[in-house]
Image (cartoon, rainbow, N blue to C red):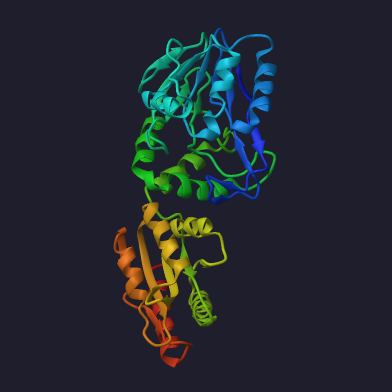
Amino acid sequence: MQIADGIFYIGVNDHELDLFEGQYIVPNGMAYNSYVIMDEKIAVMDSVGGEFDEEWLGKLDAVLDGRTPDYLIVQHMEPDHSANLMSFTERYPEAVVVGSMGAFNMMQNYFGTKFAGRSLVVKEGQTLSLGTHELQFIAAPNVHWPEVIFTYDATAKVLFSADAFGKFGALDVDEDWDCEARRYYFGIVGKFGKNVQAVLKKVAKLDVQVICPLHGPVLSENLEHYIGQYQTWSAYDVETQGVVIAYSSVYGHTKAAVELLAKTLEEKGCPRVVVTDLARDDQAEAVEDAFRHNILVLATTTYCGGVFPAMEQFIHHLLDHAYQKRTIAFVENGSWMPTAMKGMKALTDKLEAIEYTEHNVTIKGALNDDSRAQIDALADELVAKF
């Protein structure tokens, strides 16, 4: 597939993968993207996952049409993009490997070599001419590994963005970009919002017409939307007004309280209510929803004198991904001595810029008139925030 004049796509689709990075469910697989810039000199942009070496090299050979690549530019050393460095360098022994100093240090760790005598270390602002195509390198540390660089083709106005602007899902499946890009962003990159903001400021100075990420589709239309989403996500701003209720329930009483709260919120005019069962639903989806909306209700039972495991795990996910600038409310249950709220707050107090509601809900076993009144009061307080 031709992306622009002289730029071709040679990536692959992986439908065998069940968990990306060992934890994220990918029902529609993953795309591992790679590109070739054909000019007086030829540059290959990253490789693909290790099990796809023959498919990738075959696609590369077809584009080369008998020519030999001059450079392999390594923007990101994660194995789903770098696993075939050895296969490439063995097939093309004259090609120069290009990357940041951090990338070459990682090559030593993964492959036992820094490709001495055929390496080119590049830094922020350094350029590389292929003939007509002029490449400019942009340091993008911690987006989302520390060695990452972007590459801007000033001639074609194409930004090769490493993992930024990527998404879950193979390219032969039609699905919404926002949903899977959001889940990908907050799961993979979410902790590093300041780093993303820094590189977005650099990108804003460029005339970018096409974005070529290492996962997901090539973006060539409505770039303001995709860049705008990244601005919102990396600033931890609210994307959608609404309440997310994340809960865990043992015998159904906490679930009944959550269902009543959701119903009450909707009746009182809440713009959007999302309910997720942390013990059964994908927690990555729950994290995505929590970041997307402005209010989060954490509802769980007391368990072994503390917080139910599924809820504790979820809050740790929020901590790991720098959840912030949101409102949090609590619903707790405990048949004889509810302590879940105390445990949840001890964890969420570690988050930055969190506002807590005045009203919360405590249930002792099953719902009664008192706990129903607490739910009504909490719903009033939450709806008043919209």
Q: Is residue 334 above or below residue 238?
A: below
Callout count: 0
| Residue 110 picture location, percent across and down | 47, 29
Residue 159 lies, with reference to residue 154, above or below; the image says: below
Q: Is residue 251 left or right of residue 138?
A: right
Residue at the bottom extreme, as displayed: 369
Q: Position of residue 325 (x, y in %)?
A: 34, 57
What is the x, y in percent for residue 263? 53, 78
Q: Quadrant of residue 174?
A: top right
> Hey, which quadrant is residue 374 in on the image?
bottom left
Q: In which quadrant is the C terminus drawn?
A: bottom left
Residue name at image x 40 percent, y 62 percent: 315
The residue nearer to you, when weighing 300 against 223, is 300
Q: Report the front residue among 198 and 332.
A: 332
Query: Where is residue 105 drawn, in percent x and y?
Result: 39, 26
- Relative to 20, residue 267 above or below: below
Q: Is residue 384 visible?
A: no
Q: Is residue 195 visible?
A: yes
Quarter occupied by residue 81: top right
Is 362 situated left or right of 169 in this image?
Answer: left
Q: Is residue 5 shown above or below 117?
A: below
* Residue at the (53%, 25%) spot, across then down: 46
Residue at image coords 47%, 57%: 287
Looking at the figure, which quarter contains the N terminus? top right
In depth, the one of 58 and 89 nearer the eye is 89
